[in-house]
Each structure stands twice: as structure tokens, then as C-alpha cells.
Image (cartoon, rainbow, N blue to C red):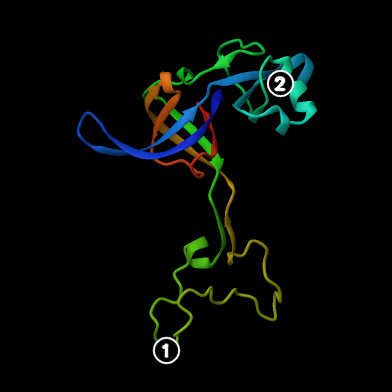
Amino acid sequence: MSGLIGKKIGMTSIFDENGKNIPCTVIEAGPCVVTQVRTEEVDGYEAVQLGFDDKADKNATKAALGHFKKAGTVAKRKVVEFKGFDEEYKLGDTVTVEHFTEGEFVDVSATSKGKGFQGVVKRHNFGGVGQATHGQHNRLRAPGSIGAASYPARVFKGMKMAGRMGGEKVKVQNLRVLKVVPEKNLLVVKGCVPGHKNAYVTIQK
């Protein structure tokens, strides 16, 4: 799917024509530079590699500097490949937020916020033991039995337990584009998207 690389600015809300308050996320989408064009003959598949967010040359490797120099641009912090563009792009071309139109639906993916080590109530929505009766004074958020006995005498893989939560790639699908602001490279989508403020996001049609 074709798309753009962006940066999550934050959340706000706007009113629609019926006066309903809609929560939305503001994304700085592009401009992205075409840093490589994949072809069937050379690479075995067709795709367009886009780069976003300038980076100082001193912070980039020599290999990366040479790669971006071919496209006639400076080093980029984020590089992603996209398929399915209708237009023919060449090295050095720029793709802007005008690639999207108001009213269409997009998929947004990013790395979710890291929550650290969490218990089963927060991580897996366990209910705890419910009421603190029958001597359950300190077991309200405990996982309880995990089902193992003399047989199978082990814990099955994938058992829902406490552990590290968040920090995973998450995709939210079918978010409606509420507004496109080309002069500021802003995209406003309905609802929330994963990641912290200023996190890199991938927007796909």
C-alpha cells in the first residue's frame, strides 16, 4: 500500500458539521524524499523507498551518506519502503501530505508506548480474585493458579503472566482523514494512533 512517513504531534478534538466533538490525532506527514526506487529487474519487486526527517551528516554512517547522496538529499532519520504508488517516482522526488484526501481511510502503524514490567490485571485484563473475602487480604491483583499439576508438570508456552508490556509495533486500521493542511504538512485523523508524542508513524492508504 502506498503511504507516507510522519511524526505524531499529539491529540486534540474538532467539531463536525453536526456539532459533534470528535477526538483526533494530528500527524506531521512528510514531506518525504524518494531515496531509492526498487524495480522488478534489479530487486525482484517494485517499491519506493521514502526518507523523512533530516539528520546531521556527522550522525550518519558513510554508507548512509552515500546512499542519500545518490538521491541528492541530506541524511534522513527514518526510511520506509512503500508499494502501490499510482505515480511514477524518480530519485529525489518529494511526496507530500497532498497524497491523502479528506474523507478517505488510512492505516497508521507505530511502536506503542513502553509500559515496563506490569502485572496480569493491567497487561491481560485479569479480574483478580474479585471480593477481598475469605482471607484474601493481599491477593486482589494476583494471577491465581496457572493450571499445572503433577501432569503436565510444566508451564505451557504462551501462558498469560506478568511481564514487559508495550514497546511493540501496533497498526490501527481504517482511521478517517478529517483534515489535510498542505501548507503545514499536517494530517488530522479520527481517533488515536500508537506511540508517544514525536514518535515516527507510517501512514498507509
| Mark 1 lies on residue | 134
Q: Residues within 10 Å of mark 1 (few under 14, many from 20)?
A: few
Total marks placed = 2
Q: Nearer the viewer, residue 168 or 28?
A: 28
Label 2 – label 1 distance at C-alpha:
67 Å
Q: Quadrant of residue 41?
A: top right
Q: Position of residue 126 (x, y in %)?
A: 48, 67
Identity of the residue furthest to the left in this view: 18
Q: Quadrant of residue 175?
A: top left
Query: Circle 1 sits in a helix, a strand or a loop, which is it?
Result: loop
Q: Amino acid at mark 1?
A: His
Residue 64 drawn above or below residue 196: above
Identity of the residue furthest to the bottom in this view: 135
Q: Is residue 44 visible?
A: no
For the point 43% across and 26% down, the residue is 186
Residue 128 drawn above or below residue 99: below
Residue 179 drawn above or below residue 192: above
Q: Is residue 163 visible?
A: yes
Query: Circle 2 sits in a helix, a strand or a loop, which is it?
Result: helix
Residue 68 has which mark?
2
Q: Amino acid at mark 2?
A: Phe
Horizontal side of 189 relative to 124 (left or right) equals left
For the point 62% across and 12% down, the residue is 89
Horizontal side of 107 relative to 160 (left or right) equals left
Q: Position of residue 45 (x, y in %)?
A: 71, 21
